[in-house]
Image (spheres, helix red, strand yellow):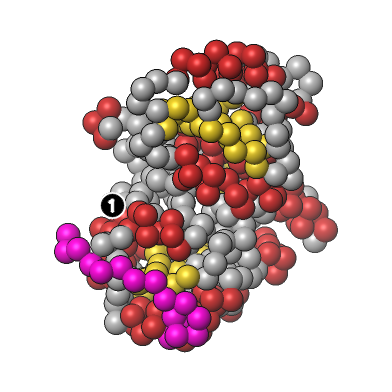
Amino acid sequence: MVTLDTQIACGPGGIELAANCLRRGELVAVPTETVYGLAADAENQDAVAKIFKAKNRPAKNPLITHVLSSAQAAGLTGNWPKHAGILAAAFWPGPLTLILPSAGKLAPTVSAGLPTVGIRVPAHPVMRGILEKCGRPLAAPSANKSGHISPTTAGHVLEDLRGRIEWIVDGGPCAVGIESTVVGFNGEQPVIYRPGIITAEDIDAVLRRAGISVPILHHSAPGDDQPLPSPGLLSRHYAPHRPTHLFMRAELTHLQTVLESLVSGAGRPGVISFGPLPMTFKHVTSIALPENLYHAAGELYTAMRSLDRDDMSAILIELPGTDQLAGAGGDASDIHDVIPRLSGLARVLADRLVRASIPRPEAHR
């Protein structure tokens, strides 16, 4: 790969520059309210191929296409289910992606060869300005190396993609801080492919207010040899380079022993909690996120990146919401039993953290 001189632009000039680059078939990292995206003209097959190369993204992992309005989204689909219209009216512009039948107007690699397309109407004013100036639908997965922690600042993008792209448009820190909720449809049955800040409870409430009472299904990822119907289904994803482990607040005494075993000449462990912990640990770098999980979501990836350094031996992250579960069990083997009992944003953040904590394959270490 040719090494590029990566630069950061901002303001109206950055929007104009990004639009011109995208029309020429180039890549630009752009801000959204969720995470920074690596954008390309979704109708340009060569441009879209550059996304997969720059990110080292598996070809089976489809992209999300960003447009300005529901009307533009409908023009890219072959079918618009009734429930899709209700959800779009409730949550667009915003952090919701809908998986819908494709009208075949976009580059085939956007959908990874599938007959569906993921579409979102973003709310971030800079991204909307770029879409308006560019006049193209923009494919834009997270602007990071595939599988790594998603970027929520321009600086995070630079850490991952320096030399791989020419331009980053700085729109400030992302307000939401985690990727969009992805919802598809089995007929008229809504299916959550990837949970996000718009929770299953939010979706259920909107549909019930519209007089529609349907269960919300959660999709399980297919095997490694099968195409992915949605972004965000890789088993290991959103992951630091450092070994990452999860713990529950009920196990702080055991945690102390684990932390002591991770202190070595090669580095010290880091701990991320949701709210302050009731005890302190020696030789440990600790970060307490806000107890409010909405605010914590906006800071989580920044905290993970700040501990993902060569001088850290491991990262331990609290599984949020477990302190509110009566009888939430003890050792780490109980975590996967506890997760189905979580709800709302605790369940959403657990999804990200479980994927982040899966060990890297030996071949890629």
Whole-percent x and y of residue 317? 56, 32
Q: At x 34% / y 71%, what residue is drawn?
A: 7
- Residue 233 appears in the picture as rendered: no
Crowding at dot 1, Cα within 10 Å, few <14 / some 14-19 / many 20+, comes out as few
- Residue 173 appears in the picture as rendered: yes
Answer above or below: position of 192 versus 307. Answer: below
Q: Secondary structure at mark 1?
A: loop
Quarter of the image with the C terminus in it: top left
Give the quarter of the image for residue 95.
bottom right
Q: At x 62% / y 31%, what residue is drawn?
A: 319
Q: At x 40% / y 59%, what residue is drawn?
A: 157
Whether residue 45 sits left or right of residue 283 in the image: it is left
Residue identifier under label 1 = 56
Answer above or below: position of 10 versus 225. Answer: below
Quarter of the image with the N terminus in it: bottom left
Front position in the image: 6 or 1: 6
* Chain part drawn in magenta: 1-16
Q: Is residue 332 magenta?
A: no
Residue type, numbered disc 1: Asn
Whole-percent x and y of residue 178? 56, 52
Answer above or below: position of 43 versus 349. Answer: below
Front position in the image: 283 or 19: 283
Whole-percent x and y of residue 60? 33, 50
Give the quarter of the image for residue 175.
bottom right
Number of marks in the image? 1
Whole-percent x and y of residue 247? 59, 24
Q: At x 60% / y 38%, what residue is drawn?
A: 287
